[in-house]
Amino acid sequence: MGLQQRRQKHKSNKNQPSGGIHMPGSYSRLLGVIGKPNTGKSTFFSAATLAAAEIANYPFTTIKPNRGVGYVRTPCVHPEFKVQDNPNNSLCMDGVRLVPVELIDVAGLVPGAWEGRGLGNQFLDEIRRADALVHIIDASGGTDCEGKVCKPGEHDPLEDVKFLEKEIAMWMASILRKDWQKIARTAETDKKGILAPLEERLSGLGIKRSHIFEAIRKTGLSQEKPTAWSDDDFLGFVDRLRQISKPMLIVANKIDLPTAEANVKRLKELDYIVIPASAEAELALRRAAEKKLIDYRPGDPDFKIAQPEKLSPNQIKALESIQEKVLVKNGSTGVQEAINTAYFKLLHMITVYPVEDVEHLSNHNGSVLPDAYLIPQGATARQFAYIIHTELGESFLYAVDARHKTRIGEEAVLKDRDVVSIVSTKRRT
Ligand SMILES: Nc1nc2c(ncn2[C@@H]2O[C@H](COP(=O)(O)OP(=O)(O)OP(=O)(O)O)[C@@H](O)[C@H]2O)c(=O)[nH]1
Ligand SMILES: [Mg+2]
């Protein structure tokens, strides 16, 4: 199928949330899909979003970034409550709730990108807004430093980890270095500390004051005497800031190729969450599921052929190969696991279901368990009300935990898979 046809097709894809699903506003988090060229970033993105993105076996296939909606997968609460649900802001597939999240797939980075090599800084700029990163690595070692195809096993993918860390840190450092002397001196003379000026300088990169505070604390550097920081101190601080503000996991992609296995083991020895994956396998399964040829939900450990008569012998062979080389060995294709891990483990988010009527678990239209929100772990009932709507936060009276039918106060910290009703002076949830 040509790209044009694919685009047409995906426009009419009913599962795409653009047509009706409302992305929860202020707390939505953006996931950046990054790495050197040709590692499978766009394949991962397409599999996750089923949006058309150009995929090819050469570097710099992607020039303009692709933005799209994927999903985190969580067991829906409806079976526990023994009700049928009517999802609105999310999907529910046989007890699996799929909550929309936003992904961005950018062009490949090559060594020296921070200085403008390859497609350069422009693409680093595109990940500014990302809250977490998935680093797609060709674990088969079949792509060289510049993203050109090489003999599988020839390139050591461990080098890619260091290179990417350095590119991001150097890019951040180059932005900060321009004003560093001035910031450091002023912070000392007017004794207001370094947090506020750094926050101002870095807010465009999605870096918050709490990130800066944490990075200084972890490096043990002096907030009061930043002019005394050596160049190494400065770079150490920036690297900490990178780790804290852009938490990252590694997707060890192309595990369907035999040379990947040994590299995956070595990657797992690094200080990172490493998810072995085959983006290509996930893309094939999702496309087959979309056409109802197989029964498969994103992240499932297996699939069932639904319409064997519509599959050619070659297609059946390809599906069997996915089963044997990826699903049986790895438990899943890894794509859904990577997205879930990014939101639940890197960004520490939980899923909460707001309802209006705690007896029927419905909203004012009678829809049962219509919405699932991804919110930060530690959020209180009142903060959750604010996330839904500012007015609801302002007029908050109390909340009701629908599972235990108990009243909870504004300071109560919500838990994953809570179902809550917010009662306010104006309206319920
Ligand atoms: N064997 C195998 N090949 C894969 C997998 N994922 C992607 N590929 C192939 O790797 C090549 C590059 O894929 P893309 O998705 O275009 O890679 P990219 O990282 O977006 O590349 P740029 O946009 O050029 O940076 C294509 O030939 C894909 O078919 C996988 O899981 N297994
Ligand atoms: Mg690409």
Image (cartoon, helix red, strand yellow):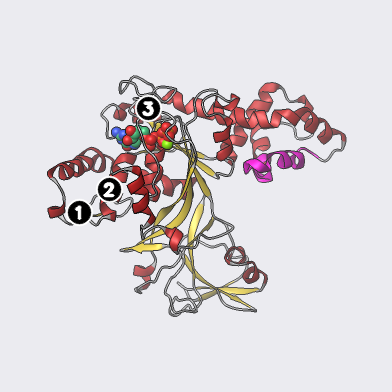
Residue 154 in sight from this viewpoint: yes
Q: CA distance from mark 3 to mark 1?
A: 33 Å
Q: Position of residue 97 (x, y in %)?
A: 38, 61
Magenta stretch: includes residue 220: no
- Secondary structure under badge 2? helix
Name the amino acid, label 2.
Answer: Leu
The residue at the point 57 percent across, 62 percent down is 413
Q: Which residues are magenta?
A: 193-212
Residue 74 is drawn in which quadrant?
Answer: bottom left
Name the amino acid, label 3.
Answer: Arg
**Left or right of residue 16: residue 198:** right
Residue 314 is drawn in which quadrant?
Answer: top left
- Secondary structure under badge 3? helix
Number of numbered discs overlaid on the protein picture? 3
**Relative depth, front residue between 314 and 181:** 314
Q: Residue furthest right?
A: 189
Disc 3: residue Cβ within 8 A of ligand 1's nearest atom? no
Q: Relative to 244, say whether 74 is above or below.
A: below
Q: Ligand 2 lies in which image quarter?
A: top left
Q: Which mark is residue 188?
A: none
Q: Which mark is residue 285?
A: 2
- Magenta span: predominant SS is helix
- Mark 3 against mark 1, which lies toward the viewer? 1
- Mark 2 against mark 1, which lies toward the viewer? 2
Q: Earlier in the sequence, mark 2 or mark 3?
A: 3
Provide the residue designation for mark 3: 266
Q: Earlier in the sequence, mark 2 or mark 1?
A: 2
The residue at the point 58 percent across, 31 percent down is 121
Provide the residue designation for mark 1: 304
**Left or right of residue 29: residue 362:** left
Residue 252 in sight from this viewpoint: no
Q: CA distance from mark 2 to mark 1?
A: 10 Å
